[in-house]
Image (spheres, rainbow, N blue to C red):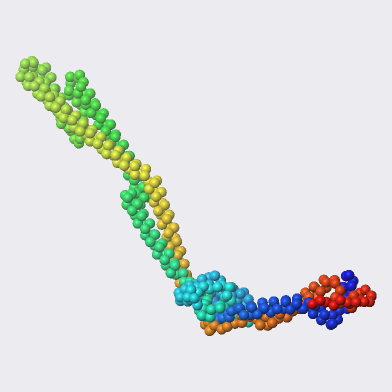
Amino acid sequence: MADAQDRRTQGMTLRGFLTVMLRRKWFVITVLLVTVAVVAHMAWTATTVFESYSKLLVSRGQQTTAFSPQMKLLSWEEELTSELETIQSAAVYQRAQEILDAQAVTGSAGEPVQIDPNRVAANTPGKSYVIHILYRSSERAIVGPVVQALTEAYRDFRTTTRGVDPTSFLDDEIDELETDIRAWEKRRAEFLASAGSVELPAERAQLLATRRQLEIDLAAARSEVAEREARVTWIQDLLQGEDESPERMYAFNDPYERGESVVMGLRRMIMTVQSEYFAAKSRYTESHPEVLMLRDRLVELRSALESEVAAYLGYQDAQLQAAWARVNSLQASQDFVDERLARFPDREAQLAAIDRTLRGLQATHTALVGRRVDAMTTRIGTNLRDVVILQDAVEPYAVRSVDAVRMAVVPAFALLVAIGLAFFADSMDASFRDRTELQRELNLPVLAEIERFK
């Protein structure tokens, strides 16, 4: 059977071709009609799209600053590709959307216009630095405003956004730093005032010197107290002794008095009268008036000496109390200095932390001031005008929404496909279709033929 089909195919003629087409005509007609219907529906339902564009000139080979002779040069492909991608970037979209929102541009239904990034295009006519920004939409009224907004957004991005003047930002940062520095300086002054000092290192050195002097004075005062205590104890022991000779018992002098004391004068007087008394007693009897007078005189002088010694002992006690008061005062002063010195590590740590913060803020302030000077110099010498609008958004115009040539080719291509499918379906049919095929294949005559019933 396959051999029969091959032979039948090889003997295909124009008549055979027409026979197959007539036999499969409804198949071909159906495919062709469906294709034409689809194409007609697409052409009928297609909406008109409007387009607008603007022209920009992008400068090339600009100096970085007026003080720098270097020129930043890139290849044409690199620069133009970068610019085309920049136009279609999210930064430009967002800026253009802000411009449209500020202008309150609305669509046909009154809703705010939203830029569709898929409808934005950018190209360059040939190898030049002129860029076209295009936008397409089915709403004629919004195409022009959108293109103009994209144009202004790109220009602002290239001139304003990219070349933002940093001096205002630096001024704000410098003002904020100066406020912080003043606050920390005030805090440092308040801390020193609360600590009762001006500068801790100088105060520490002064306190150490004061403590050394206090130690010297305290040692001298304690030595004086010990000496006066020993003197008072010695005098008290002498007064409480059993010696009957007061002129020998009070044989002392006050080292803190200049010249001879009253006690020493009385002692010399007693010794003189005692000598006279013993001399008179050796010459006279006990009842002799001169002996009696000298004895009475000696008794009076000894009584006066005892009174003076008692007064002197009171004086020594007062001096001892005064010495003790001086010792206590010096000890209290030393304790106060020790307490101040004991608080120094914590106070020095707090002051060191404040000073470190102040030094950091001052270093940052100095660096920002230098940056501000550099930024002002760069701003004065920088040429930011590197984008020129050659043409604003043109009046929207209709563009072809349906390609007529391609639409016309589609039915022709569908007809070829239908013919091919018709021959394929006919080749798959192994039945004999008329007596001629039967006689040719079997080499037998056909005796009778039954016509096809309608």
Q: Residue at x 69, y 82 (%)?
A: 408
- Name the quadrant of the N terminus: bottom right
Q: Quadrant of residue 428?
A: bottom right
Q: Is residue 13 visible?
A: yes
- Work out whether 272 lies above or below 325: above
Residue at the (37%, 46%) spot, across then down:
344
Q: Position of residue 47 (x, y in %)?
A: 59, 79
Position of 327 relative to 424 (above/below): above
Q: Quadrant of the C terminus?
A: bottom right
Which of these two is toward me, 212 or 378? 378
Residue name at image x 75 percent, y 77 percent? 26
Image quarter for residue 433? bottom right
Seen in the image, is 30 located left or right of residue 354?
Answer: right
- Nearest the eye: 196 or 8: 8
Residue 51, image x, y percentages: 57, 81
Report the side of 213 relative to 14 (left or right): left
The answer to whether residue 413 is left or right of residue 62 is right
Question: Is 278 displayed left or right of 324 in the figure?
Answer: left
Q: Residue at x 47, y 67 (%)?
A: 371
Between 447 and 343, the residue placed more toward the observer is 447
Residue 224 picture location, percent across and down: 27, 34
Residue at the far left in the pictured view: 289
Q: Going by the picture, which residue comes out furthest to the right?
A: 444
Measured as percent of width and height from the top left, residue 16 is found at 84, 80
Residue 86 in view (yes/no): no
